Image (tube, coloured by chain):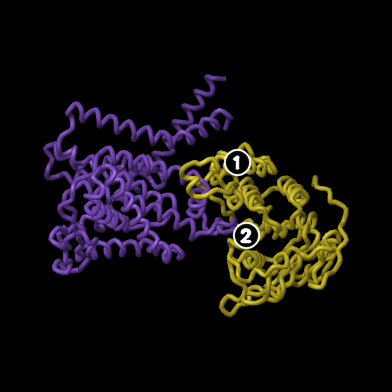
Chain colours: A yellow, B purple
């Protein structure tokens, strides 16, 4: 594996029982969930979910299939309204917000089953991420007033700049639906980044990628965090990726957090090994 | 793929809107030339303005169905709103604005305004929902407009507009004129519509729709069509952009309706029924969802075709041939085997060309 881990970050406990990297500790967490829960019918899909994420932390959410990881993402982005609990985004309660407002407030996400605008070009997909930063009205768009040309030029430059993170500039004029799987996943990340988030949610970013692509993705995720100075929460089944780049990890099982801590702590936690990671062959 | 084909791909896409203007202008000039040379039969001449109206209708419906991806079955309703409001304004302003092109322009603007108002009334409650509710509600809307116009009497005199559900209820003064007479429709209309006006309306429609599609709002509208959940996740408000597309579509239909209404001395409300709405939907589907050029061509051809077939000795089978042509075009344009075959042919040609240049 090409990826070399950076020096380990010392984690400091905070009142919300989660741990945050030391460099973020003076600042309030970007995201704080308190007793978050949702019921589908009689089933509690997520219950008593407590978590805090530091301003520039890369956090991981792992767990077996059906544990409720994606449901947590859907709660954070208000695709589902929580039945119980509070989500504080940068100290602001998102209770009354819609998906659109949550995005404007600073949460961007990618999807487990890729959701691109397939009939639009790659460039347009990124420009749609920039939608709320491209500022000109309906009429200047229709009658091509000077503000249109200026704003569109800026948007195009910004889109190409963002695409260059993944070296995807040369794909700009292809339709998003015609891209290969890996490129579609990367485009989703670029589009999410374009919305200028303070917290980026990645739902299985490495799904369907081979080991070398995954290693590249790990570098890029760290690079994104360093350049944009944002927090990243990711769901992933690839333990190399999770253990390699996450500073804090929460393990979810049957809708409940069963363990939280650094990668080292999680790796050696007997509850997590029992529920998710499994025992090593020689020990068994 | 090599760089050469890239650039040409981009170039073709950027050129496409201008090609549409060019096609419309060329067609207009060709028809004007034919008119000068007396090559157009009377029945064809009477079709010139309706063709323009249907082209505008098709482009505007394409905005709702092809670009926004919502099914509307009541586009005729907006046309009706525009037609009757346009007729009323043109009659009411007869003395105030003697210049007929100006009066026509005002009538079209009022027609557009009424179409847009109808769009807002339908759109605000319905576009908030997910699913095919728009199709159901617009279907009902078209029928409601038709039935309301069939019982409405509207007249004008020096005191202003009069409206009633009975002819006697109009209470017009001696100098007043009844414009809309319930089941008899609008009567005694001065024909203001001209082919040139229709041509200009098409150009304006093209300008609005094409520029909209390639702007920030248009991108958002297409994003909602492709993936609503993803669009919301990047901060695009679904209701707002759906409403923008739908209202612009309705406004253009209103303007087209006004032009249509002012092309005849009398207009019946039953002209704008479900069949008209479906006919326009046929133009859009046949021309290809989202393809503006397809809409223009399909609307023109399918409006002229029944008249053209009249010239041949196939009078009884006219509509049969029309139907067969519809079916054949549908089969051919939706045939994946044929399209992949054409694509392969084009690729081979491009490779040969690329090889020659290197």
Q: Secondary structure at mark 1?
A: helix
The residue closer to the viewer here, A244 or B132, is B132
Left or right: where does residue A135 sit relative to residue B168? Answer: right
Left or right: where does residue B249 sit relative to residue A35? Answer: left
Residue that appears at 56% across and 45% down: A124
Tell me the quarter of the picture where residue A151 sits. top right
| Extreme residue toward the bottom, this view | A42
Q: List the residue tagged with mark 1.
A: A156
Residue that appears at 34% across and 52% down: B112
The quarter of the image holding the N terminus of chain B is top right
The quarter of the image holding the C terminus of chain B is top right
Residue B232: which numbered mark, if any?
none
Q: List the residue tagged with mark 2.
A: A103
Left or right: where does residue A92 sit relative to residue B215? Answer: right
Residue B27 at what x, y percent from top left?
Answer: 30, 33
| Marked residue chain, label 1 | A
The residue closer to the viewer here, B354 or A283, is B354
Q: Residues within 10 Å of mark 1 (few under 14, many from 20)?
A: some
Residue that appears at 72% across and 60% down: A233
Left or right: where does residue B194 sit relative to residue A214? Answer: left
* Figure check: A282 above or below B103: below
Residue A131 at what x, y percent from top left?
Answer: 58, 51
Residue that appears at 70% across and 43% down: A165
The residue closer to the viewer here, A11 or B78, is B78
* Figure check: B104 above or below B31: below
Q: Earlier in the sequence, mark 2 or mark 1?
A: 2
Residue B168 at what x, y percent from top left?
Answer: 13, 68
Find the distance from the CA under tag 2 to the CA under tag 1.
Answer: 21 Å
């Amino acid at each position: 594996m090409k990826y070399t881990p950076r020096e380990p970050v010392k984690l400091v406990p905070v009142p919300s029982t989660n741990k945050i990297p030391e460099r973020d500790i003076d600042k309030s967490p970007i995201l704080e969930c308190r007793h978050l829960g949702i019921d589908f019918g009689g089933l509690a899909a997520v219950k008593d979910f407590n978590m805090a994420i530091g301003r520039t932390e890369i956090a991981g959410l792992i767990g077996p299939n059906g544990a409720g990881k994606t449901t947590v993402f859907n709660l954070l982005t208000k695709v589902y309204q929580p039945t119980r609990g509070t989500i504080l985004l940068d100290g602001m309660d998102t209770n009354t917000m819609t998906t659109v407002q949550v995005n404007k407030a600073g949460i961007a996400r990618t999807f487990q089953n890729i959701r691109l605008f397939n009939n639009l070009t790659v460039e347009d997909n990124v420009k749609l991420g920039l939608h709320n930063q491209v500022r000109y009205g309906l009429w200047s768009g229709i009658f091509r007033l000077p503000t249109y040309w200026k704003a569109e030029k800026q948007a195009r430059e910004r889109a190409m700049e963002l695409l260059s993170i993944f070296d995807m500039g040369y794909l700009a004029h292809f339709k998003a639906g015609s891209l290969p799987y890996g490129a579609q996943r990367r485009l989703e990340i670029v589009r999410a980044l374009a919305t200028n988030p303070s917290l980026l949610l990645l739902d299985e970013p490495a799904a369907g990628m081979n080991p070398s692509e995954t290693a590249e993705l790990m570098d890029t995720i760290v690079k994104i965090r360093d350049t944009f100075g944002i927090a990243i929460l990711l769901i992933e089944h690839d333990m190399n990726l999770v253990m390699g780049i996450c500073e804090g990890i929460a393990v979810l099982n049957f809708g409940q957090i069963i363990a939280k801590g650094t990668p080292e702590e999680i790796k050696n936690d007997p509850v997590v090994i029992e529920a998710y990671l499994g025992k090593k062959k020689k020990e068994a | 793929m090599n760089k050469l084909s890239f650039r040409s791909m981009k170039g073709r896409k950027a050129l496409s809107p201008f090609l549409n203007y060019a096609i419309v202008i060329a067609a207009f000039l060709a028809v004007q030339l034919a008119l000068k040379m007396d090559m157009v039969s009377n029945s064809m001449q009477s079709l010139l303005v309706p063709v323009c109206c249907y082209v505008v209708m098709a482009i505007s419906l394409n905005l709702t169905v092809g670009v926004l991806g919502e099914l509307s079955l009541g586009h005729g309703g907006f046309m009706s709103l525009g037609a009757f409001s346009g007729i009323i304004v043109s009659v009411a302003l007869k003395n105030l604005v003697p210049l007929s092109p100006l009066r026509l322009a005002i009538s079209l603007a009022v027609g557009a305004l009424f179409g847009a108002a109808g769009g807002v009334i339908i759109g605000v409650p319905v576009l908030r929902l997910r699913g095919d509710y728009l199709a159901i509600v617009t279907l009902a809307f078209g029928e409601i407009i038709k039935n309301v116009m069939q019982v409405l009497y509207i007249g004008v005199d020096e005191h202003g507009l009069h409206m009633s559900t009975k002819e006697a209820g109009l209470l017009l003064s001696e100098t007043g004129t009844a414009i809309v007479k319930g089941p008899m429709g609008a009567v005694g209309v001065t024909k203001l519509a001209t082919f040139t006006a229709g041509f200009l309306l098409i150009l304006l429609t093209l300008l609005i729709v094409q520029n909209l599609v390639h702007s920030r709002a248009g991108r958002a509208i297409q994003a909602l069509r492709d993936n609503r959940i993803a669009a919301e996740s990047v901060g695009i408000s679904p209701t707002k952009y759906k409403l923008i597309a739908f209202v612009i579509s309705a406004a253009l239909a209103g303007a087209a309706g006004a032009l249509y209404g002012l092309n005849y001395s009398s207009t019946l409300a039953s002209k704008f029924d479900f069949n008209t709405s479906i006919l326009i939907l046929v133009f859009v589907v046949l021309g290809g969802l989202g393809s503006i050029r397809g809409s223009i061509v399909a609307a023109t051809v399918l409006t002229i075709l029944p008249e053209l077939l009249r010239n041949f000795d196939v009078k009884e089978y006219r509509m049969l041939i029309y139907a067969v042509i519809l079916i054949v075009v549908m089969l051919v344009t939706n045939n994946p085997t044929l399209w992949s075959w054409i694509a392969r042919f084009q690729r081979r040609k491009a490779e040969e060309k690329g090889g020659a240049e290197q």
